[in-house]
Image (spheres, rainbow, N blue to C red):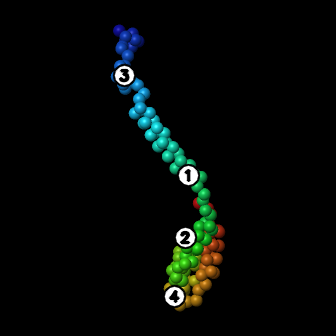
Amino acid sequence: MTPEELVPRLAGIRIPESFARFGWQDALAAVALGLLAGLLLSALLRGLTARRLSPRDTARAAIARLASCETEVRIAGLAALLRANGGALPKEMQEALYNPRAPVDPAALEAVVIAAARRRPRR
């Protein structure tokens, strides 16, 4: 007997009738999978469509947070922010990092930070 003759003689696959029926457990599983797919899709879309701030706006927000700090902390924070934006600290400001009595104008350093952030490309 050849395989072509044998295949039509084989009995069909038999599974229990309760397994072949679509029941309420199957409906709940389909709903759960749909909710999971929706959550994943919404997270993906939120990541793709989120508003991205420019480096200049991010620097301005950080400067505003530093405005309420003490002068020494403010100067150190502005120096770190300048370094994060790829700028170099001016010579007259370097002394202010190590000497708390050195005269320093935080507004001038803020302008340097914003200028460095303006040159930095968006990510």
Q: Mark 3 sits on what residue?
A: 17
Question: Label 2 amino acid?
Answer: Ala
Q: Measure the alpha-carbon separation of dots 4 and 2.
A: 23 Å
Q: What SS does tag 1 mark?
A: helix
Marks counted in the figure total 4
Are there few (<14), some (14-19), or many (20+) residues within 10 Å of tag 3?
few
Label 1 sits on what residue type? Arg
Which disc is residue 100 wearing? 4
Q: Quadrant of residue 65?
A: bottom right
Q: Which quarter shows the N terminus?
A: top left
- Residue picked out by circle 1: 46
Q: Is 109 situated above or below 1?
A: below
Q: Camera-side residue: 113 or 119?
A: 113
User: Residue 84's mark?
Assistant: 2
What label sits on residue 24 in the rendered view? none
Q: Earlier in the sequence, mark 4 or mark 1?
A: 1
Viewer-side label of 2, 1: 1
